[in-house]
Amino acid sequence: MKNIAIVGAGVAGLTALQALSEHGHKVTVFDKSRGSGGRLSSKKVNNSSWDMGAQFMRAHTEEFARQLKEWEAIGWVAEWEVIPWSINGTQRTASPDDVKRYVGMPRMTGLSRKMLEVADDFVTQARITGTAFDNSTQQWTLTTEENAHFGPFDELIINTPPLQAIPLLPEASALTETLEKVSMLPCWTLLLGFDTPLDCPFDAAFVKSGPISWIARNNSKPGRDSRETWVIQANSEWSEHMVEAAREAVQAELLDAFATVTGTDCTASDLWLHRWLFSVPAQTPELGALRDAEHNLTLCGDWCHKPAVEGAWLSGRRAADLLTGADL
């Protein structure tokens, strides 16, 4: 049995946790926030709540399709039977497809909380700012920004964006050069809550024009509160252009675009604007996960495979595979 540390409680890290726990290893998970989920993040403001990150899960592989069905059977996820629309300028049309879309229950973070239950320990609000690898013992110690120390650990898994992972690598790690080549794109996300339902014919849409790429009525998902809530996600190109813009300017442009896309002119009673600084990789590397065997170090995340929940899940499985040498 190994004593393993995972930095980052996103889907990739939690998937590795589950696989490693099944192999009998002791696993401690660290996260800088108060909870788990990574891109499964949820948000609550006053009486409104939203899925702030990933809007749904879908499968392109048989492995993840089976996993979604298993989660559905035990109530961790449910199918969101939504008919997406396609919007391009003033053209708004229903665009039904055969895709099965799933959401965590009763919110996206509900899935991550269930996945986390097998952890031996979960250390929250712990931003890991320092690591040390002892070559003689082949073990790791971790240090938080509050100068708290944890360890020793036999293995370290880092599940963070590349720029946040680089400072945690040993100077001699061969992985640094690979991470420095990964470019991440931002995403502005606007969350709106309304006192009355909007007169809008669709619950979700892919938007092909303007600053918005995706829009969804969050309360149309199973298990959610009935209060009218909407998630507006900007496209990467616009988000990158506006990455350092004043929040007021970002919010104003997205509100105007929201009114145009939905054909409504209502004032939100609850509002939240969030900037995902490291949303998706500029190019999909499809590396699975990365391993530095000399330092008992493994890196994973959707950024090193594909930018979706499925990509994170596949990366976490690959990380556990590389660490244990087992065919998971």
Image (cartoon, grey):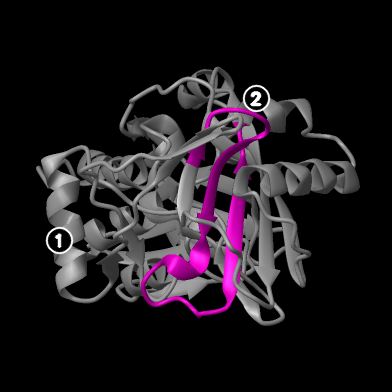
Q: Is residue 37 visible?
A: yes
Residue 146 appears in which quarter of the rendering?
bottom right
Image: 86 above or below 152: above
Given residues 328 and 186, the one toward you in this image is: 186
Q: Are marks 1 and 2 in contact (CB under 8 Å)?
A: no
Given residues 129 and 12, the one toward you in this image is: 12
Does the magenta segment cover residue 239? no
Kind of residue at badge 2: Glu
Given residues 303 and 175, the one toward you in this image is: 303
Q: Which residue is mark 1?
A: 69
Q: Position of residue 9 (x, y in %)?
A: 47, 59
Q: Earlier in the sequence, mark 1 or mark 2?
A: 1
Image: 187 above or below 241: below
Viewed as shown, does residue 265 lie left or right of 140? right
Residue 42 appears in which quarter of the rendering?
bottom right
Residue neighbourhood size for the residue with mark 1, other residues' Cα within 10 Å, grouped as few (<14), some (14–19), many (≥20): some
Q: Position of residue 154 (x, y in %)?
A: 36, 53
Q: Which residue is mark 2?
A: 237
Residue neighbourhood size for the residue with mark 2, other residues' Cα within 10 Å, grouped as few (<14), some (14–19), many (≥20): some
Residue occupying the point 57% across, 46% down: 132
Give how far apart the Cα atoms at labels 1 and 2 are.
34 Å
Asked which secondary structure carries label 2, the reply is helix
Residue numbers of the magenta segment? 206-235
Kind of residue at badge 1: Lys
